[in-house]
Image: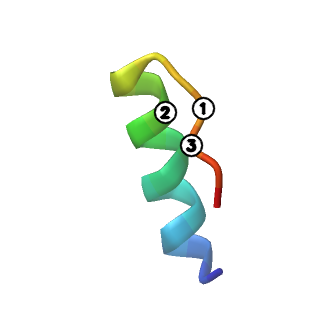
Amino acid sequence: LPLAGLFVTAYLQYRRGDQLDL
């Protein structure tokens, strides 16, 4: 994943409060 994508994924996990399986 692009570096920006990693930040977006981490942000979504923080906001949602769960872990997203890629």
Q: Which residue is mark 1?
A: 19
Q: Quadrant of residue 2?
A: bottom right
Please tell me which of labels 2 and 3 falls first in the chain: 2
Residue at position x 39%, y 40% in the image: 12
Is label 1 or label 2 in front?
1
Give the image's coloring scheme: rainbow
Image x and y of residue 18, in percent: 52, 22
Q: Which residue is mark 3?
A: 20
Assign a secondary structure to mark 1: loop
In the rendered image, residue 7, in percent from the top left (x then y), is placed at 52, 55
Q: Helix, strand, or loop for circle 3?
A: loop
Q: Report how far apart the C-alphas of labels 2 and 3 lie in the structure.
A: 7 Å
- Dot 2: within a 10 Å radius of its alpha carbon, few (fewer than 14), some, or many (20 or more) residues? few
Residue placed under numbered mark 2 in the picture: 13
Between marks 2 and 3 in the image, the one whose residue lies nearer the viewer: 3
Asked whether the residues under the numbered discs 2 and 3 touch, taking CB atoms below 8 Å apart as contact, a structural biologist would say: yes
Instruction: Tell me, for residue 1, which label it has, or none.
Output: none
Disc 1 and disc 3: Cα gap in Å?
Answer: 4 Å
Q: What amino acid is labelled 1 in the image?
A: Gln
Q: In the figure, 14 relative to 12: above or below? A: above
Q: Determine contact: label 1, label 3, CB under 8 Å.
A: yes
Which of the two labelled residues, at mark 1 and mark 2, occupies the earlier sequence position?
Answer: 2
* Above or below 19: residue 20: below
Q: Position of residue 3 (x, y in %)?
A: 61, 74
Mark 1 and mark 2 in contact? Answer it, CB < 8 Å: yes
Find the residue positioned furthest to the left: 15
Q: Seen from this angle, which residue lies furthest top?
A: 17
Assess disc 1: are there few (<14), some (14-19) or many (≥20) residues with their C-alpha within 10 Å of its C-alpha. Answer: few
